[in-house]
Image (spheres, rainbow, N blue to C red):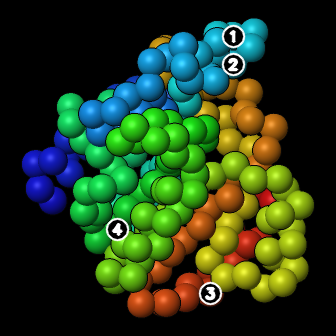
């Protein structure tokens, strides 16, 4: 693992949630959105928290299975780092911003991250992408036999401000496993292993 990758894959340092390989929803690259231009600037309603990170136990469970070597959405984000344009690792954990960001002067949302993950898959790389969707979508994916999609349940993300655990998004988190060269894992169905 290179120096840049070691820096990006932070180790859990204790507390309720601590620090792990995470997402920076403020922006990527040199084009950063001012917090007041971001629809999330007011925080999460009552608690005022802004940015949410993967709980260490969930990340550890996925990392044990997939052996991640790169996080294109790290927290904290290194200066001048751009996860949408850089070359990804061979085994990637991708927890992209749940809203839109400004990237290279243009508003970009989850579609940009999904396109990049598919581009990296075509290069023979594995990416595990987590993103909130309505539970019914995951139910239909399971019913139609979709491979390599998991339901992580309503994840209680961790606040960047103090590491406290949030109340969740109210939506289930889809875990899309993009395997290199169309490799398919039997354990990766929509109903496998994690909360439904």
Q: Quadrant of the C terminus?
A: bottom right
Of the residues under marks 1 and 3, which one precedes in the sequence? 1
Q: Is residue 82 visible?
A: yes
Report the Cα–Cα distance between label 2 and label 1: 6 Å
- Contact, CB < 8 Å: mark 2 with mark 3? no
- Contact, CB < 8 Å: mark 4 with mark 2? no
Crowding at dot 3, Cα within 10 Å, few <14 / some 14-19 / many 20+, comes out as few
Check disc 2 and report the residue beneath it: 44
Q: Is residue 149 left or right of residue 6?
A: right
Report the Cα–Cα distance between label 4 and label 2: 31 Å
Of the residues under marks 2 and 3, which one precedes in the sequence? 2
- Contact, CB < 8 Å: mark 1 with mark 4? no
Element assignment for label 4:
strand
Residue mark closest to the camera, 4 vs 2: 2
Check disc 1 and report the residue beneath it: 47
Q: Within the image, what quadrant is residue 86 found in?
A: bottom left
Element assignment for label 3:
helix
């Amino acid at each position: 693992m290179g120096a840049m990758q070691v820096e990006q894959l932070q180790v859990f340092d204790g507390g309720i949630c601590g620090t792990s390989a995470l997402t920076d929803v403020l922006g990527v690259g040199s084009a950063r959105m001012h917090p007041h231009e971001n629809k999330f600037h007011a925080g999460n309603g009552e608690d005022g928290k802004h940015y949410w990170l993967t709980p260490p136990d969930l990340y550890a469970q996925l990392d044990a299975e997939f052996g991640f070597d790169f996080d294109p959405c790290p927290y904290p984000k290194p200066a001048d780092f751009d996860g949408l344009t850089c070359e990804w690792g061979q085994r990637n954990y991708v927890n992209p911003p749940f809203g839109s960001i400004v990237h290279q002067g243009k508003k970009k949302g989850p579609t940009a991250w999904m396109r990049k993950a598919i581009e990296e898959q075509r290069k023979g790389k594995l990416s595990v992408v987590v993103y909130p969707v309505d539970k019914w979508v995951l139910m239909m994916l399971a019913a139609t036999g979709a491979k390599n999609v998991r339901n992580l349940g309503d994840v209680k993300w961790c606040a960047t401000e103090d590491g406290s655990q949030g109340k969740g998004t109210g939506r289930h988190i889809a875990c899309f496993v993009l395997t290199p060269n169309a490799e398919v894992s039997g354990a990766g169905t929509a109903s496998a292993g994690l909360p439904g």
